Image (cartoon, rainbow, N blue to C red):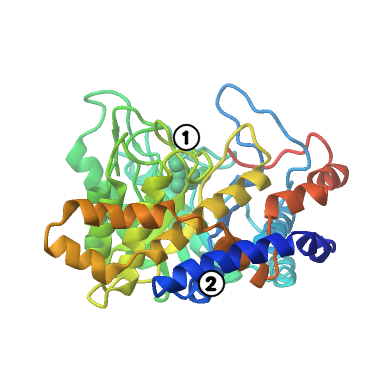
Amino acid sequence: LQRLHDFNHAKQAEHDLRLSYLSDLLSRRGIDAQDVIRQLVQFQVAIPSWALGTGGTRFGRFPLGGEPRNLEEKIQDIGLLNQLNGSSNSISLHIPWDIPSDVAAIQQRLQEQQLVIDSVNSNTFQDQKEQAYSYKFGSLCHTEQGVREQAIQHNIECVRYGEQLGAKTHTVWLADGSNFPGQQHFRRAYQRTQESLAAIYEALPSDWTMLIEYKPYEPNFYSMIIPDWGTSYSLCQQLGQQAQVLVDLGHHLPNTNIEQIVGRLLHFGRLGGFHFNGSMYGDDDLTTGSMKPFQLFLIFNELVDGAQDLAVNNPAVAYMIDASHNTKDPLEDLLQSVDNILGAYAKALLVDRPTLAELQQNNDVVRAEELLRDAFLTDVRPLVQEAYRQAGGALDPISAYRTATVREQLIQQRGKLSLSTGL
Ligand code: AOS
Ligand code: ZN
Ligand code: ZN
């Protein structure tokens, strides 16, 4: 990527023209473009270790080649992304897929790439070879104490690995649930889950956060133990201040008003984390912003509104991309996702909040909506590109990636059939 400078140089003149036109337009509205760009440069979204290889479905997987074979290579890939867009300075790990064999070596790699560990994620949705009990009928919710204890210990082990690597967040997503009516006693299963989570929470260092992710269906199709934000919220309330709700954009039934959920959680000070992806039907894990860009903007509108409102007392939100699919080069997909995320964020930063508040107060429905539409329809790409450039990245990360023939080189280094651990 040494050619990044030359690459930007060729695009610079046109970029300057577009940026100065937009900066002029914005300054007429009292918005300082540089101020927006500064906030875009600061925005960081974590990359999970499992998004770097082609995901596959239960029907098949079509390896792309050059995919990372171990944690070191995953760190290398994320370092590459971060060089291109300056927006992905952290990595989320999945235990046991990413158990570090040599902690010092991993720390060294992270330092070289100027990356940090974002969160550790437990895995009780699969059985591992050496484990004593099966998770076929659940983990933290299981009817048998031995299974619950094994799952609790696994979660605590994740936290211990995370501590060695400087993580501060533990994410729990449970596949637990039932496939058939009558299979599970709803109240007792919830109670057991709550008690198991409390045991994990007790082992959490005092400066850590525990994120509880909800999902309405899959892999269980009749009931999930934590199907919705209300259940996550109730668990967090019982656990304590270090527990927070995690919103994954793909974990809602079609047409759910996700932006309202975000607003509610901010109001309660319980929004801890975000998993970005795109969804047409459910947990599709498509490119963020590829399906519902207006909804993504409305979600950022809530986030920005909450961040600017002194009455809101919510801790910093941990952002991550949770996507994994079968067709694109995963690195190109992640660059697209970050681009859509920053675009939605930039548009939300353009919203004239005092005027919007006034319109809402006076019930001026049309002008309130028009105000949001105006921000949404603004072409903010010059701001996002300038943020990449100021962060030392490429004006156009995807074409820089292609021009530098990154994938071809990775295939040469790692082989055509390299397989990453993961889904
Ligand atoms: C699963 O559907 C959830 O989105 C999880 O956050 C995550 O994708 C999983 O833990 C990855 O293995
Ligand atoms: Zn997720
Ligand atoms: Zn998911």
Q: Residue at x 62, y 51 (%)?
A: 335
- Which numbered marker is on residue 284? 1
Percent coordinates x, y for residue 113 in the rendering: 72, 68
Name the foreground residue: 38 vs 272: 38
Q: Residue at x 59, y 48 (%)?
A: 336
Name the foreground residue: 43 vs 412: 43
Q: Residue at x 56, y 28 (%)?
A: 57
Q: How much space separates mark 2 and mark 1, taking CA atoms?
A: 29 Å
Apparent side of residue 238 relative to residue 275 in the rendered image (left or right): left
**Can residue 302 be spotted in the picture?**
yes
Apparent side of residue 18 relative to residue 8 in the rendered image (left or right): left
Q: Residues within 10 Å of mark 1 (few under 14, many from 20)?
A: some
Q: Residue furthest right?
A: 412
Mark 2 touches mark 1? (CB < 8 Å): no
Q: Earlier in the sequence, mark 2 or mark 1?
A: 2
Residue type, mark 1 in image: Asp
Percent coordinates x, y for residue 230 in the rendering: 22, 50
Percent coordinates x, y for residue 264 in the rendering: 23, 58
Residue at image mark 2 = 42
Q: Circle 2 — which element?
A: helix
- State whether residue 196 is above or below residue 279: below
